[in-house]
Amino acid sequence: MAFRSVSAALAAVIVLSAHPAVAQTWPAKPIRVINPFGVGSATDVIPRIILEQVQQNIGQPVLVEARPGAGDTTGTAQVVNSEPDGYTLLVNSSAHTLTPAMYKSLSFDPMRDLVGVAMLGVMPQVLITSPAAGLKTLKAFVADAQAKPGTYNYASTGVGAATHVSVEKFRLSAKFEATHVPFKSGAEGISEVVAGRMNFYFCPIGTALPFIQEGRLLGLAVSTPRRAVALPDVPTTIEAGYPNSDYTFWFALFAPAKTPRPIVDRLHQEAMKALEAPSVKTRLAQNGVEALVMTPADLDKLVATEIKDNIELIKTLGLKTN
């Protein structure tokens, strides 16, 4: 027994002492970053801007792969089950902290099985509708929805996604009915609103902005407590008269929990360096992304806090969990 204990201790020392060496040689091959939502979604578009710069800085390909399905659980589980070597990462939105509240039986625990690497930024969501509907203010929109119970529908990127829960929180405050129609990607949701088949979509500004600027969509309100820099003339849902209707949508990078800390720290440093690049700052601003600086430890704390709060929110909203 003593021999086994000594052997185990020696093995632990060898592994720990190897971590700095691993960090020095990392990255030695391409890095895969799994996006648990579809191509064209904000969770796909925005991280690519930052990760393209990371790729240039580290001299290795950083490949973003979309793995949508079952909210964000399919792609997230793939990362959780991967080797914790810094070569398979997860990029997710604030839906990351909604998953434990929406799914009773998960094959993973976001707090136990993943660690925060870097906060990539905050993007307000904007309630978009077709100009053809003729509803130019949020008050007019809500009044129309209340006058036509059972006829309104809305798009989202999946059950339990931020684009789903933000609408439900808003509906709770605004007191109107609408049917939820989930899609695999934000691009699909936007197309359906443009075509008039969906009444509205609480869409991340980054993907909605070009359509609003072209006049193909109308932005009625943003979800954040303060107005969005990219749409300064669009009021918040709170300003429009709907208390407790705000929702903050963010993007962050995560790694499997057992990833060596030196690699996590290096990844964080590379992400921060990329965010400081002038070209990245410009592109993020054009897409409505606002900065939110955090350490990996701060990100882990945010995740833990939001998971606790979202469990209570889902209960209040009365959303069905799976």
Image (cartoon, rainbow, N blue to C red):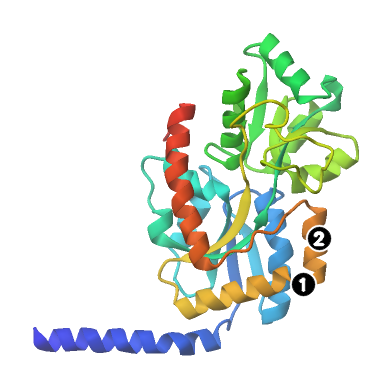
Instruction: Determine the residue located farthest toward the right in the rendered image.
Output: 214
* Quarter of the figure with residue 202: top right
Q: Is residue 249 left or right of residue 210?
A: left
The answer to whether residue 319 is visible is no
* Quarter of the figure with residue 100: top left
Q: Is residue 244 left or right of residue 82?
A: right
Q: Residue at x 51, y 62 (%)?
A: 298
Q: Is residue 194 left or right of residue 149?
A: right
Report the quarter where the C terminus lies.
Answer: top left
Report the quarter where the N terminus lies.
Answer: bottom left
| Residue 173, image x, y percentages | 59, 24
Q: Is residue 158 above or below residue 13?
A: above
Dot 2 falls on a residue whose secondary structure is helix
Q: Is residue 242 above or below residue 158?
A: above
Q: Residue at x 77, y 51 (%)?
A: 288
Instruction: Determine the residue located farthest toward the top in the rendered image.
Output: 147
* Quarter of the figure with residue 194: top right
Dot 1 falls on a residue whose secondary structure is loop
- Reading the chain from its start, which is encountered first: label 2 or label 1? 1
| Residue 149, image x, y percentages | 64, 11
Mark 2 and mark 1: Cα distance apart in space:
10 Å
| Residues at circles 2 and 1 in contact by the CB criterion of under 8 Å | no
Q: Amino acid at mark 1?
A: Ala
Q: Residue at x 41, y 57 (%)?
A: 111
Q: Amino acid at mark 2?
A: Arg
Q: Is residue 136 above or below residue 298?
A: above
| Residue 73, image x, y percentages | 48, 48
Q: Which mark is residue 283?
A: 2
Q: Residue at x 65, y 67 (%)?
A: 63
Badge 1: residue crowd in 10 Å (few <14, some 14–19, many ≥20):
few
Q: Is residue 13 above or below residue 131?
A: below
Q: Label 1, on which residue?
A: 277
